[in-house]
Image (cartoon, helix red, strand yellow):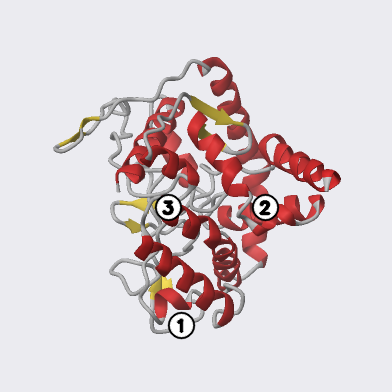
Amino acid sequence: MKRGFRRFGFAFLFVFIAMPATHVLAEPAYSGDIYADPDASNAGTMENPFAAREPIGAQPGLLEKDAFYGDRNVPAADLQGKLFQGHHWGPIRVASLEKGKENDLVDDEFWGTADTITDPLESMNRAFFHFNDKLYFWFLKPVARGYGAVVPKTARIGVSNFFYNLAGPIRMVNCILQGKGEEAGYEFVRLFMNTTVGLGGLMDVATHGMDLDRYDEDLGQTLGVYGCGPSFYIHWPFLGPSSGRDTLGMFGDSFLNPLSYLAFKYNIGARTYDRINNTSFTIGNYEDFKRSAIDPYVAFRDAYYQNREDMIRK
């Protein structure tokens, strides 16, 4: 038993300091309210690096036919690309990231003007941000580009669905903890149907066949719902932006992720593969984001914070 907990602890530590991925560099392109074509020229249009992934379905503007349901349109990648699925992603009231406006905060008629998260570790965070930036250009981007050239998009969408489905217990349990019984029920049905009828989660039949919504809840949001503030900003190497509260949430959610119980090498290998698969859909988005902001670090930090606060309020 002690050996098992020790192995799990080492695996979790490795995820924090040695997983070759950044969750902010591997998300679907975003332009307005729909996914933008990763291969299209959309420089300067990407307002929100933390935009929500809409459920797969027939929606205007989505780019291609469903890999498994030919009569439906889907985004190029309907992914939940985070290490601990459901964590950090959702609609955002975000400051404009255009040049000269990246620090302007949006006035919300109900919540008022958003504040930025405290950043007492800015020097260290900037160093880690720079590290992640180089990691993307020197490792993640070229590997994902080669992978995307070899593996058909249909297969890559199936892989994305699979990893998103694996994190179903995280979403379901946190819905329960937040008192969202109906949403927890939907997440249970999604998990059951996609695991069984959807061939282990490769197909999202809960969305296509049953029109069930997604509820991307996580422990960081749950703590926020019960009044726990974000504490301070942390930009983790490999993992990207987070906060004290959300880092604690990642740790708690990891106990509900089946990948955490694999042997160390398989655990890390699966998470790395998930990240590379996600990135294969979004090459070019990070570059556009950097060009659109005077200070990309500040833009990431403020967008991240506002996004998380918006998710908690829902």
Frontmost of labels 1 and 2 is: 2
Q: Which residue carries the number 1 mark?
A: 69
Give the foreground label among 2 and 3: 2
Q: Residues within 10 Å of mark 3 (few under 14, many from 20)?
A: many
From this view, report whether residue 137 is shown above or below residue 117: below
Residue type of the residue flagged with mark 1: Tyr
Residue 296 lies, in percent from the top left, at: 44, 29
Q: Nearest the camera: 311 or 56? A: 311
Earlier sequence position, callout 2 versus callout 3: 3
SS at mark 3 in the image = loop
- In the picture of the structure, the residue carrying the numbered disc 3 is 29
Task: Determine the residue located farthest toward the right in the rendered image.
Answer: 3
Q: Residue at x 51, y 78 (%)?
A: 193
Residue 47 visible from this viewpoint: no
Where is residue 26 drawn, in percent x and y?
Answer: 54, 48
Q: Nearer the viewer, residue 2 or 164?
A: 2
Q: Real-space Cα distance between discs 2 and 3?
A: 21 Å
- For the point 42% across and 63% down, the residue is 184
Q: What amino acid type is highlighted by mark number 2?
A: Arg
